[in-house]
Image (cartoon, helix red, strand yellow):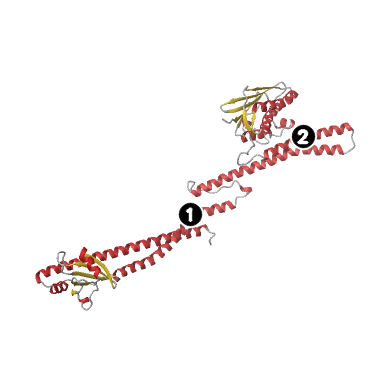
Amino acid sequence: MFDSVRTRLTLWYAAVLALSLIAFAVLVYYAAAAIFYERQDESLRSTAETVASAYVEEFEEEHSLAKAGQIVLAELVFPNRYVQVIDNNGRPIASTRNLSETALPIPLPALSQARQRGLSLVTVNGLRVAIVRLSSDRDLGFATVAEPLTVIDEGLRRLRRGFYAGVPLILLLASAGGYFLARKSLSPIASMNLQTQHITAERLSSRLDIDNPRDELGRLATTINDLLTRLETSFKEQQRFIADASHELRTPLAVLRGETEVALSKPRAVAEYQESLSLIQDEAERLSHIVEDLFMLARQPIDAPMVLLKEPLSLNETVRDCARAAQVLAIRKGVQLNTESDSESIILRGDDELLKRMILNLLDNAVKYTAEGGKISVVLARQNGSARISVRDTGIGISQADQAHVFDRFFRVDKARSRALGGAGLGLAIAAWIVESHGGKIDVESTPGQGSLFTVELPLES
């Protein structure tokens, strides 16, 4: 039962409400009791002053304490109250009929307080008693008025009964309403749970329904839908990557297997074996490059840039080393390779091996797609707090539609020519990843038939 969020919310709501109602009832009860007792004291004082005033007037006419008391108490009627006139020593002079045989025992300290202050309030034998001097300038005695405390107790008892019946009833009704509200509020989550259970790897295109995108549940559903979109994109990318990788690996493996079967099918001359082994070596090297590139891309993180072991390095020397290595390929292809660099040394914190891999990939790509007699230039410069590396060639160029995909894995502008040149479409993807891992960016500008310009910007520490 407690596994249900609705039940837990209702119980928490009921507990908090119960504590609040109990605290409120206690405060109201004691506040009401204080008001009841205060009003009783005020009423008794007023009655006592009325008796004292009437007694003094009769005493002025009759000149007798006992006779004045009898007249006053006979004329004034006070239901449920006991009225008594006493002398300065507390002895009764006159009293109402309900006190004809019993005198109110007034403590002497209360008489002293009334004599000094004109009023005293005491509780005697379950009676609340107000004591007032008959005259402020003469010691004629005191007027006492008493009322049972049970009058107040009965009112408080009724108030308690009201709380005993009302608090549980309110708590029950509020808990039922809270459970209904919790169930209604959480019903979208139950619907989201049901819809999510039907979303599988084969149905990642499904999305959760959103009734109100502005509330908390709507924003949660939006977040889940965004997550599903990312997962769908990741799954499709993974499937495409596996398919492309399998396709790229299938060709060299087929060549290796076919050439090996042909070589072993019958005895051959040494020259024929050497020719087969040479072909096998070329395909093995191509396969090795593809596997190495795949391993490099496997290091690429999905959600965050990889933490590189960055060390200070001279980007001028890195570019020169890469240019010297690419010069061998350029000379073999009959392509002219020029290098330009700022005279001032550009120091960058980065991974030297990865940066060399990135620059060599760009240069290798430029050499492959530049015809004999073409030109390639590498320029390193400092610009706006960044190191800018530009690789320009006069090769076949890239169409506007293909420029948005040149950094995708296994993408090749000229697939037939790329396969003949041994390319797998991973070089630029690796270069882009290395640049992004160093916090930089890479762009391409190209015109078909005129060449391409790849620009890398790497941030420098200030």
Say how many tags the image has: 2
Residue at the image position 22 percent from the left and 79 percent from the top: 101
| Residue 142 placement: quadrant | bottom left
Residue 174 in the figure: left or right of residue 297: left
Q: Which residue is mark 1?
A: 185
Q: Mark 1, mark 2: which one is toward the viewer?
A: 2
Q: Alpha-carbon neighbours of circle 1 within 10 Å: few (<14), some, or many (≥20)?
A: few
Residue at the image position 48 percent from the left and 60 percent from the top: 11
Task: Using the image, determine if residue 291 lies above or below residue 396.
Answer: below
Q: Is residue 452 visible?
A: no
Answer with mark 1 or mark 2, whichever residue precedes in sequence: 1
| Residue 415 placement: quadrant | top right
Residue closer to the observer: 77 or 245: 77
Q: Find numbered disc 2 in the image and state the secondary structure of the residue it sits on.
A: helix
Residue closer to the observer: 321 or 49: 49
Q: Is residue 364 visible?
A: yes
Residue 167 in the figure: left or right of residue 142: right
* Image quarter hosting the C terminus: top right
Outermost residue, bottom side: 101
Task: Using the image, determine if residue 402 lies above or below residue 212.
Answer: above
Residue closer to the observer: 266 or 319: 319
Q: Position of residue 275 (x, y in %)?
A: 84, 32
Q: Amino acid at mark 1?
A: Ser
Q: Which residue is mark 2?
A: 285
| Residue 44 placement: quadrant | bottom left
Q: Amino acid at mark 2?
A: Glu
Q: Position of residue 230 (x, y in %)?
A: 59, 43
Q: Alpha-carbon neighbours of circle 2 within 10 Å: few (<14), some, or many (≥20)?
A: some
Q: Position of residue 5 (x, y in %)?
A: 52, 57
Q: Position of residue 17 (x, y in %)?
A: 43, 59
